[in-house]
Image: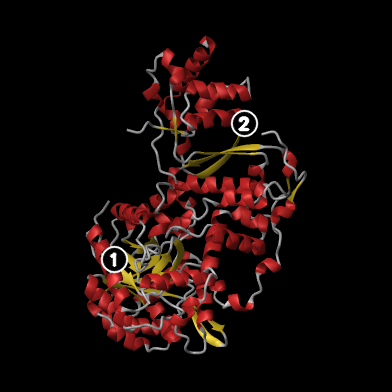
Amino acid sequence: MLTRTLILTAALGSLLSLGTAAAADDKGDMEKCYGVAEAGKNDCHSANHGCAGMAKTDKDPADWVKVPKGTCEKMGGKLTAPTAM
Amino acid sequence: MSPPAPVPARAGIGLRAPHHRDVLERRPDVGWFEAHSENYFADGGSAVATLLRVREHWPVALHGVGLALGSADPIDREHLRRLERLIARVEPWAVSEHVCWGFAGGRHTNDLLPMPRTQESLRHLAARVREWQDALGRQVLLENVSSYLEFREAEFTEAGYLAALVAESGCALLLDVNNVYVNARNHGFDPETYLDELPAHAIREIHLAGHEVTQIAGCEMRIDTHDRLICDEVWQLYAGARRRFGAVPTLIEWDAALPALDVLVEEARRADAIA
Amino acid sequence: MPLRELQQRFIASLYDESTEIEGEICADGGIGAADRIAIYRNNLRAGFGKALALEFPVIAALCGADFFAILAREFQRAHPSASGDLHHIGGPFPPYLRQRFGTGEYAYFADVAELEWAREEAARAADAVALDVRTIGTTGVDAIPALKFRLAPSVRLVASRWPVLTIWEAHQGPGEVREVDLGAGPEQVLVRRSPAGLVLERITVADLAFLATLESGGTLGAAFDTALVADPAFGVAAMLRRCVVRGLFAAAQR
């Protein structure tokens, strides 16, 4: 236990020697950062592909796609996951 | 931050995330911006920070799309609280919502559903608007929505319903000229007569947008897609609205298939050129 | 018809549970009530599906557009939007996928979705002032193991038996999606916000144990102990430095 306390004390000491400059490391490009906003999900328009009275003419889409058919086809290798976490 | 600046009587454009960088770097020559309130409900992060930076350069309006005041079930208190906090931070020149309902039994459609135009629904909606205005301590703007159906039971015309709402609640109106035109075609009424029926003094803002013409069961239906240029007929109706209501701050709305910022700025110029 | 009843019936018809509302709707001009309601039903599905795809773009790509539309519709039935703000719909999606795909071929979808939702939450979490290390500079030696650190509200930790971050990275950028070996082993991911945007970082099992202990309110000493179990050579000084430099620790709340 004594060793643990010593290690932690030394670790904290080295933190303090970083001072305040270290914490600012990550903030250098604050001025350039406004382009990263996530797209908003709330709008007030009607979906243009949702308008053709599909419900009457479409058969249940479950009839024509039963499994994922996207980029999952590129996920290869062993399909059973390793058990170790 | 500067106090809520008086909005210039010229056109603004909708603020959308893909344009954030362009807007702040290029400072387009438009009168103001409008943001969809719910897109800025986060506790923190870059979206609200960006909106506040936009607010440093232009007047901003907050346009809600999710309150659904006409719903019979109780309004979501948390939604109101977040909205109030956003209004306090942004100090918008206008706060608006829609004449619509949107949820029942805990299921939200996140759509703007048309009101049945009855005395009962009017009393309900007007009471909700009054309550909201009292809580905010300011007048709000209510917008007419586009619709693809009408309920049989109707004690008002659509414009008459808006006029009665203004009289009963003391709210102002956000007139969406595109929605008037879309509904006139979808439900068969004269859009100019509709404008005549509105209380001119209550109109504080106008919306313009593009819509799609499609066919359903062999009949024409106009869908309010906000994904293209404003059509000529809507520009004409807008000119009619300007003749009646004067120089009202006008917004170019574009939500899907968003083009370059310049396209929106050009539409705003076109609106400004109509006197 | 009373407003409440009319609205309940309308919502029921959007979810195909009843057609009772049709008699209340004008059917002039050649378009019937059912076709008119179908426009709103399609808007409901398309709007929900679009918002879900914005929140889970990698899941949408893995599924492909057709299957994702079906998956979104199934999920919407089980978990309809409960708010006027569409940002909330994604919360139940990772557990829904875990149940939907079980331990089969697509079991990793739930973990990928968890990573995508962690990004979404990190992006929207409250802002916080970073810890100024000088405020803990006077801590007495005996009290140091009992120190607690508050992680910034935007920090999220994701652990998976699959290479979830490699899968996520394979879907970024404009080019073709790169091939991924699902058997490549587990990955632990730290999601954090930097001024330049969201950052996803691979961390070790020991790093994860350390941060997860602090996140759940454990002391510095306890975090160190759990990290040592995972890796006897765990360097706590380097880890603390990383935490401070990257702003993972928030100032104590007053």
- Other residues around mark 1 within 10 Å, as few (<14) / some (14–19) / many (≥20): some
Position of residue B143 measured from the top left corner of the image (x, y, whole percent): 34, 72
Q: Depth check: give the residue in front, C101 or B41.
A: C101
- Other residues around mark 2 within 10 Å, as few (<14) / some (14–19) / many (≥20): some
Q: Is residue C58 above or below residue B108?
A: above
Q: Depth check: give the residue in front, C169 or C39.
A: C39
Q: Nearer the observer, disc 1 or disc 2?
A: 1
C231 vs B233, left or right, is: right
**Mark 1, chain letter?**
B
A11 vs B173, left or right, is: right
Return the mark for residue C213.
Answer: none
Query: Which residue does the image show at 45% across and 68% down from the upper left?
Result: B111
Residue C254 seen anywhere in this rendered image of the structure = yes
Task: Determine whether the residue tagged by mark 2 lies in a helix, strand or loop.
Answer: loop
C149 vs A48, left or right, is: left
Amino acid on which the number 1 mark rests in the picture = Arg
Residue ID for mark 1: B128
**Mark 2, chain letter?**
C
Q: Depth check: give the residue in front, B51 or A5.
A: A5
Q: Is residue A14 above or below residue C1?
A: above
How many discs appear? 2
Residue most extreme to the top: A2
Q: Is residue B242 above or below residue C130?
A: below
Position of residue B128 measured from the top left corner of the image (x, y, whole percent): 29, 65
Amino acid on which the number 2 mark rests in the picture = Thr
Q: Is residue C177 above or below residue C25?
A: above
Residue ID for mark 2: C204
Picture quadrant of residue B250: bottom left
Position of residue C69 measured from the top left corner of the image (x, y, whole percent): 61, 63
Residue A47 seen anywhere in this rendered image of the structure = no
